[in-house]
Amino acid sequence: MTEPRGPVDASRVPRFAGPATFARLPRLDEVSRADVAVVGIPFDSGVSYRPGARFGPAAVREASRLLRPYHPGLDVSPFARLQVADAGDIACNPFDIKEAIATIEAAAQDLSAPGTRLVTIGGDHTIALPLLRVAHRLHGPVALLHFDAHLDTWDTYFGAEYTHGTPFRRAIEEGLLDTEAISHVGTRGPLYCKQDLDDDARMGFGIVTSADVMRRGPDEVAAMLRERIGDRPLYISIDIDVLDPAHAPGTGTPEAGGLTSRELLEILRGLAGCNLVGADVVEVAPAYDHAEITSIAASHVAYDLISLLALKEKP
Ligand code: MN
Ligand code: MN
């Protein structure tokens, strides 16, 4: 097997020059195959408050220029261990949510077919549903770690079933998740009523609130999650609003009292060894960002997810 083709050499081409693929990696059409594809989904027609996450993939790629090839925290060089490539964006209908979901599902299925795992950059959280359908088709019911300020298990909004606040209820209804191992992490903020929590618990979700992360610390939280997940195929969905608005102002539905980017990254690192099969980072809305704070955080989160996939392969 040939050596993976890595990022553009930063000693020859400055990081701020040239096209912004994720981490300046090759495009998917420049490599013969990929173990991991980073794919953007510039879709935000499912949002309930601030729009703008359709510009997330471009902003995260731009902010990813400074990522370097070796991850000291996990002791892995993900782009040397795996062929990682940028698959560009999935173009989907901004005026028809159901059609967009079908387009995303078909495109993600095609990209995954050769055994390629996807790290997806949103886009609003609606896109998690078609991605989970594909993960389920490949692996059966998957364990889910859902990092988010919000539950995203509401039923409908203005009568609409498919929105960024409903993907995980739909996923449960469709039998996509292994309900023995599904958790929200970083939950906080006001709800509509107490019933929201009762409904969520009935679906099988565990909750590690943002306050729990502060009290127990990232290592203990990660150990607890690992215990619950075991070696099940795991999907990780990260709404960037899990971070405090101080760490991620550029998002659609900010809530005070969130995780720091350090806490989030440390929890992810504590998941090393899990059977990760796919992941997304969603809800980056660059119009509300300042100095790329949010998109830099999202690019590092995506890098850590890729590193977890690489570590899984480590001999
Ligand atoms: Mn959220
Ligand atoms: Mn969400």
Image (tube, rainbow, N blue to C red):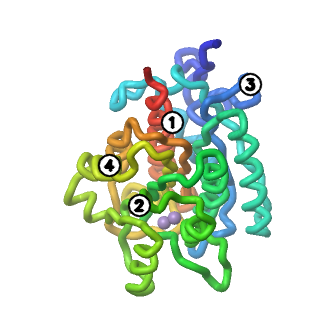
In front: mark 2 or mark 1? Answer: 2
Q: Which residue is mark 4?
A: 227
**Picture quarter containing residue 72?**
top left
Choose the circle earlier in sequence order: 2 or 1: 2
- Can residue 50 be seen here? no
Closest to the camera, between mark 3 and mark 4, is 4
Report the side of 275 relative to 62 (left or right): left
Mark earlier in primary sequence (2, 3): 3
Looking at the image, is 2 positioned above or below residue 140? Answer: above
Task: Kindly report which numbered mark, 4 or 1, lies closer to the viewer in this rendering.
Answer: 4
Mark 4 Cα shell of 10 Å, populated few (<14), some (14-19), many (≥20): few
The residue type indicated by label 1 comes to Ile
User: Which of marks 1 and 3 precedes in the sequence?
Assistant: 3
Badge 3 or badge 4: first in the primary sequence:
3
Q: Is residue 72 left or right of residue 40?
A: left
* Marks 3/4: CA–CA distance: 40 Å
Residue indicated by mark 3? 30
Q: Is residue 71 left or right of residue 105?
A: left
